[in-house]
Image (cartoon, helix red, strand yellow):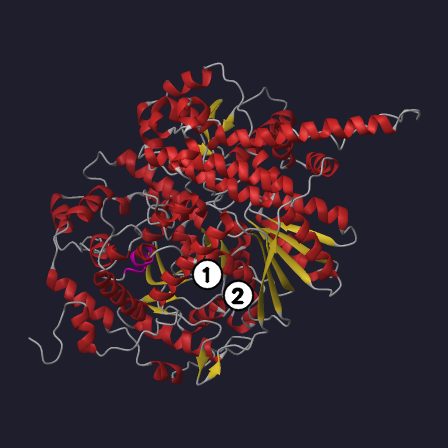
C-alpha cells in the first residue's frame, strides 16, 4: 500500500464505530488506543442521541394498531403480537438503528417473528446472508423451524457452520442463512487475535488484503459482510470481555438483531455489550455508556436522585431500541396469548437429623473462615474461596455426596509439575495471566483446568480425559508408539501438562488463598454464571453476606492455630465420615450377634451397603463414567449399592410417583449433573417401569437432539433430567407439563428460562412448577437475592409495578438527555 493510501485511510476516522474512511475496522492497536483517547465531541454526541430518540415508536395504542401482514411463504399465520413485532422490526431496520433488541418474554415466538422478517425483507444485493449465532442447543432448532415454517416455494438455503471445518466466505455468502454457535465465534476470535499478533510489527500490514486471514477467519475478516446478524439468546454476550462477545462485536453486517427474553440478568452494565454489537450510538462507546449509567452499577454509591435520573434515561433508550412484551401483556384489552395457567409450588422439605448436623458443621466452619477474611480485609483476595464456601453449602442442601465429589485429598506431587510450571516461556505465562478460564472444546468456564505444555492453552478435566482416550485408541488402531495430545486450540503437540493451581503456585501465589487445596476444585459446577453472579451481588464489605457472618467469639479458638483454619471446610466432611464409620461399626456388632449360629453366606462381590463411601473412589468412578457405558454402569451400581438418602432426592421421587398417576411428563432441572446422577439412581430403583433420558452439557449435539426427540415422541419416556446450564434456554418441551427445580439458582431469570421450556406456545395442559427448598439454609438467602435481581431488572425494563414507561414528548426527552431545554425554561 502506498504512503498516500495509508494517509488517506488515516483521515476521516469514525471514532465511535472505530472504522476508517472506507468503513474497514481499524488495526487492533490503533483501535485500542482510540477507545482510550478518542476526543469527546459534544455536538456529535447530541446528534447521535437525537437520532436514537427518533426511533421511539408512537404511543402504545398506535403501536398495537400497526400490524404487518403475515409474509407470503409462511405456512402458518402470525399471532397479532408477532405481526406488531414484525412491523416494529421493519421500522427499526429502515430507521437509524438498523436493528435492535426483540426482548419478548420467553415462549412468545421470537424465532418465528424473525423468520417472518427474513422473508419480508430480503436483500436486494449480492450480500444476502443472514448469520444466526446461538447456543449449540438452538442451532438444530433453527434449522428445523426454517424447514417446517416456510413453504417449498419460499425455502431459504441454509448452511450449518462447524468449528472443525472452515468454509470460505465466498461459499458462505451463497446461502440465505448461515448458522453457527458462540463457541465457534470465540474459536475464530482466538485464531484472529493470534494471527494479528504475529503480524502487528509490520506498519504496512492491512487485514483486508490478508488472504491467509480470510481463510482462517471467514466470519471476522473485514471483507466479509452479512446482510443481517441475529444473536439468539443474546444474553450470552453480556460480558463484553469474553472471546465470544469480542468476536460478534467485530462481525460486519447491514442489520444487527438481539433476541433475548432476559436482556438484563444481573445488572444494567450488561446492556453495553448488546449496544456495542448493535452499534447504538453514542452508547456503543464504553466511556459514554459508563458516564451515563455508572451510577446503576452494583457497587456504586451515587445518590438516589442520580440513580433515578440514570434509570429514567436507560428506560427511554430501551424504548428506542427494544420491543418487550410479557405473556400476560394485552393487545386491545385482550391477553397476548391464552396459555394454560402456570402454578408455582414451593416444596419445603426438612433435613434428616444427620443431614442437619452435617450442614450445620459445614456452615459453622465456613462462617469462621469468612470471618477471618473480613477481619483481615482480604475478602477480595480470597473471593474465589468464598464462592466455594457458598457452593459447598448449596450442594450440602441437596445431598452430602455432592461435597464428597469434590473434597478429595489431592494426589501427592514429587515437585516435577512445579518445575515444569516455573520453566514455562515468559510470553505464555503472560498470556495465561490475562486469559479467562474457558475450555475451547465444551466452551465451559472452569476453575482448575489442565494447561497443555508447551503452548499453555487450557482444557477442562473432562475434555482432557476424552482427548487422551481418543489419542490412545488412535495409536492402537494405527499401530503407532504412544504419541502426545494435539492442542485443540493451536493444534500443537503436547506431551506434558500441569494443573492451573500449580501454575498459580509458580507464577501467581497471591491468587492462592487460604485453604486452596480444599477449596479451589469446582470441576462439577455446571453453570459458568455462578461466579459472575456472585461478583455482581456481593460487595467486598459484608454487604449481602451479612447473614453469613458469626460473632467474633465463634472463632477465638481458631486464632491460636492458623494452619488448622485452612482445613476447616474439609473437616466437616471428614467429621461426617467418622460418624458414619462409627455408626457402621455399631450396626456390624448388632448384625454379628444376630447371626451367631447361622451358616456363613457366600461373599458378595460388591461392596457392603454398610461400608461408608470413600470420596476419592466416588469421584474417580464418576470421572471414569463419562468415558464409556461400562464405566457408567459401574458408577451407577456403586451409588445404588452404597445408597444414602437425602431429603431432596426423596422428595423428587415422591413427586415423580405422584405424577406418574396423571400420565404427565416431567422435566427435572439441577445445576449439578452429580445430583442428576443421584436422582437417576433412585428413578431406576424406585420407578423401574418408567423410561427417562438426560440432557447435559457433556453430551454431543447429536446425543442431545436424540434425547429431545425421544422425550417428545416416545410416550413411555416420561422423565428428562436436565442440567440447568445446558437446557435452560431455547428448548421446546411442551410435551412436559411438570417441572421440578431441585436447587435454586442465584439468578431468577435462569430459572424462568428453564420453566419456559414447557410453558410456551403449544402447551395444552396446566404447567406445575415444583421448587424443592430447605428452609433455614443458604437457600433462603438465594431467594432473597433472586428478588433483589428481579426488582432491579423489572425497574429497568418496565416489567414491574412502577415500570410503566410513561411516554415523554420530544422536548422532555431531549431535556432528559441534556440536548435541549424544557418548554418555558432557558
Which residue occupies the foreground of this view, 84 or 409? 409
Q: Count neighbours of disc 2 (C-alpha within 10 A) and say few if under 14, some if 14 to 19, many if 20 or more.
A: some
Distance in Å between CA atoms under marks 2 and 1? 9 Å
Q: In the rendered image, which residue does mark 1 sit on?
A: 177
Instruction: Indicate whether residue 275 is drawn in magenta.
Output: yes
Q: Is residue 65 left or right of residue 349?
A: left
What residue is drawn where x is 68% and y is 43%?
645
What residue is drawn where x is 50% and y is 32%?
569
**Image coords of residue 374 (percent x, y):** 34, 37
Q: Is residue 82 left or right of residue 668?
A: left
Q: Which mark, residue 363? A: none
Which residue occupies the foreground of this view, 567 or 444? 567
Q: Earlier in the sequence, mark 2 or mark 1?
A: 2
**Residue 699 visible in the shown view:** no
Quarter of the rendering containing residue 516: top left
Q: In the rendered image, which residue does mark 2 sit on?
A: 146
Q: Count neighbours of disc 1 (C-alpha within 10 A) and say few if under 14, some if 14 to 19, many if 20 or more.
A: many
Which residue occupies the foreground of this view, 497 or 164? 497
**Image coords of residue 761 (percent x, y):** 56, 71
Quarter of the rendering containing residue 127: bottom left
Q: Relative to 553, is 165 above or below?
A: below
| Residue lying furthest front | 553
Q: Relative to 108, is 666 above or below?
A: above
Which residue occupies the foreground of this view, 293 or 240? 293
**Image coords of residue 586 (percent x, y):** 74, 28
Which SS class for mark 1? strand
Q: Are marks 2 and 1 in contact (CB under 8 Å)?
A: yes
Q: Is residue 122 left or right of residue 682?
A: left
The majority secondary structure of the magenta stretch comes to: helix
**Image coords of residue 447 (percent x, y):** 45, 36
Q: Which residues are magenta?
A: 273-279
**Residue 368 visible in the shown view:** yes
Amino acid at each position: 500500500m502506498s504512503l498516500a493510501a495509508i494517509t488517506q485511510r488515516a483521515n476521516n476516522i469514525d471514532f465511535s464505530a472505530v472504522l476508517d474512511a472506507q468503513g474497514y475496522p481499524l488495526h487492533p492497536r490503533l483501535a485500542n488506543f482510540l477507545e482510550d483517547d478518542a476526543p469527546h465531541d459534544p455536538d456529535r454526541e447530541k446528534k447521535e442521541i437525537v437520532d436514537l430518540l427518533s426511533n421511539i415508536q408512537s404511543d402504545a395504542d398506535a403501536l398495537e394498531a400497526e400490524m404487518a401482514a403475515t409474509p407470503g411463504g409462511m405456512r402458518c399465520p402470525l399471532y397479532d403480537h408477532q405481526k406488531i413485532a414484525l412491523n416494529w422490526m421493519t421500522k427499526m431496520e429502515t430507521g437509524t438503528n438498523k436493528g435492535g433488541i426483540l426482548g419478548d418474554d420467553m415462549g412468545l415466538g421470537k424465532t418465528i417473528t424473525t423468520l417472518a422478517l427474513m422473508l419480508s425483507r430480503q436483500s436486494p444485493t449480492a450480500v444476502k446472508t443472514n448469520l444466526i449465532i446461538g447456543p449449540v442447543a438452538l442451532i438444530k432448532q433453527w434449522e428445523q423451524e426454517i424447514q417446517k415454517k416456510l413453504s417449498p416455494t419460499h425455502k431459504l438455503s441454509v448452511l450449518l457452520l462447524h468449528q472443525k471445518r472452515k468454509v470460505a466466505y465466498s461459499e458462505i455468502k451463497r446461502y440465505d442463512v448461515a448458522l453457527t454457535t458462540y463457541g465457534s465465534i470465540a474459536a475464530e476470535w482466538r485464531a484472529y487475535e493470534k494471527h494479528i499478533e504475529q503480524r502487528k510489527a509490520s506498519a504496512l500490514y492491512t487485514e483486508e488484503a490478508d488472504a491467509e486471514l480470510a481463510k482462517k477467519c471467514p466470519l471476522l475478516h473485514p471483507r466479509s459482510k452479512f446482510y443481517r446478524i441475529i444473536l439468539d439468546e443474546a444474553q450470552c454476550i453480556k460480558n463484553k470481555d469474553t472471546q465470544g462477545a469480542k468476536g460478534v462485536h467485530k462481525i460486519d453486517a447491514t442489520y444487527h438483531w438481539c433476541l433475548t427474553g432476559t436482556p438484563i440478568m444481573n445488572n444494567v452494565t450488561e446492556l453495553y455489550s448488546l449496544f456495542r454489537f448493535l452499534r447504538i450510538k453514542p452508547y456503543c462507546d464504553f466511556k459514554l455508556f459508563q458516564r451515563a449509567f455508572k451510577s446503576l452499577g452494583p457497587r456504586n454509591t451515587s445518590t438516589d436522585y442520580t440513580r433515578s435520573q440514570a434509570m429514567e434515561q436507560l428506560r427511554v433508550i430501551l424504548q428506542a431500541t427494544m420491543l418487550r412484551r410479557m405473556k400476560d401483556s394485552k393487545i386491545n384489552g385482550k391477553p397476548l396469548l391464552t396459555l394454560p395457567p402456570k402454578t408455582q409450588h414451593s416444596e419445603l422439605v426438612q433435613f434428616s437429623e444427620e443431614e442437619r448436623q452435617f450442614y450445620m458443621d459445614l456452615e459453622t466452619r465456613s462462617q469462621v473462615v469468612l470471618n477471618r477474611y473480613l477481619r483481615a480485609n482480604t475478602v477480595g483476595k480470597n473471593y474465589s474461596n468464598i464462592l466455594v464456601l457458598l457452593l459447598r453449602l448449596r450442594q450440602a442442601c441437596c445431598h452430602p455426596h455432592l461435597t464428597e465429589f469434590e473434597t478429595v485429598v489431592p494426589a501427592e506431587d514429587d515437585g516435577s509439575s512445579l518445575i515444569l510450571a516455573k520453566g514455562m516461556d515468559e510470553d505464555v505465562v503472560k498470556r495465561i495471566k490475562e486469559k479467562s478460564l474457558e475450555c475451547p472444546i465444551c466452551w465451559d468456564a472452569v476453575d482448575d483446568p489442565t494447561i497443555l505444555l508447551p503452548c499453555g492453552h487450557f482444557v477442562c478435566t473432562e475434555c482432557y480425559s476424552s482427548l487422551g482416550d481418543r489419542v490412545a485408541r488412535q495409536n492402537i488402531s494405527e499401530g503407532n508408539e504412544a504419541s502426545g495430545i494435539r492442542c485443540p486450540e493451536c493444534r500443537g503437540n503436547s506431551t506434558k501438562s500441569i494443573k492451573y493451581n500449580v501454575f498459580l503456585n509458580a507464577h501467581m501465589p497471591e491468587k492462592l488463598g487460604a485453604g486452596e487445596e480444599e477449596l479451589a476444585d469446582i470441576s462439577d459446577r455446571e453453570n459458568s454464571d455462578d461466579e459472575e453472579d456472585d461478583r455482581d451481588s456481593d460487595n467486598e464489605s459484608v454487604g449481602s453476606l451479612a447473614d453469613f457472618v458469626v460473632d467474633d467469639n465463634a472463632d477465638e479458638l481458631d486464632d491460636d492455630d492458623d494452619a488448622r483454619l485452612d482445613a476447616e471446610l474439609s473437616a466437616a466432611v471428614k467429621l461426617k465420615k467418622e460418624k458414619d464409620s462409627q455408626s457402621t461399626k455399631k450396626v456390624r456388632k448388632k448384625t454379628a450377634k444376630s447371626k451367631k449360629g447361622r451358616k456363613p453366606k457366600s461373599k458378595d462381590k460388591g461392596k457392603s451397603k454398610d461400608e461408608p463411601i470413600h470420596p476419592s473412589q466416588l469421584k474417580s468412578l464418576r470421572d471414569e463414567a463419562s468415558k464409556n457405558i461400562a464405566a457408567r454402569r459401574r458408577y451407577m451400581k456403586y451409588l445404588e449399592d452404597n445408597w444414602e438418602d437425602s431429603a431432596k432426592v426423596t422428595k423428587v421421587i415422591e413427586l415423580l410417583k405422584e405424577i406418574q398417576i396423571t400420565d404427565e411428563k416431567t422435566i427435572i432441572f439441577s445445576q449439578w449433573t452429580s445430583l442428576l446422577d443421584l436422582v437417576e439412581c433412585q428413578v431406576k430403583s424406585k420407578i423401574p417401569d418408567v423410561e427417562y433420558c438426560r440432557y447435559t452439557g457433556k453430551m454431543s449435539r447429536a446425543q442431545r437432539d436424540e434425547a429431545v426427540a425421544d422425550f417428545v415422541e416416545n410416550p413411555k419416556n416420561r422423565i428428562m433430567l436436565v442440567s440447568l446450564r445446558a437446557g435452560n434456554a431455547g428448548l421446546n418441551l411442551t410435551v412436559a407439563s411438570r417441572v421440578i427445580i431441585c436447587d435454586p439458582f442465584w439468578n431468577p431469570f435462569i430459572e424462568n428460562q428453564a420453566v419456559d421450556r414447557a410453558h410456551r406456545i403449544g402447551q395444552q395442559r396446566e404447567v406445575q412448577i415444583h421448587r424443592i427448598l430447605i428452609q433455614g439454609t443458604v437457600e433462603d438467602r438465594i431467594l432473597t437475592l433472586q428478588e433483589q435481581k428481579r426488582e432491579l431488572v423489572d425497574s429497568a425494563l418496565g416489567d414491574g409495578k412502577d415500570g410503566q414507561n410513561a411516554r415523554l414528548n420530544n422536548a422532555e426527552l431531549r431535556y432528559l438527555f441534556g440536548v435541549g431545554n424544557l418548554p418555558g425554561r432557558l
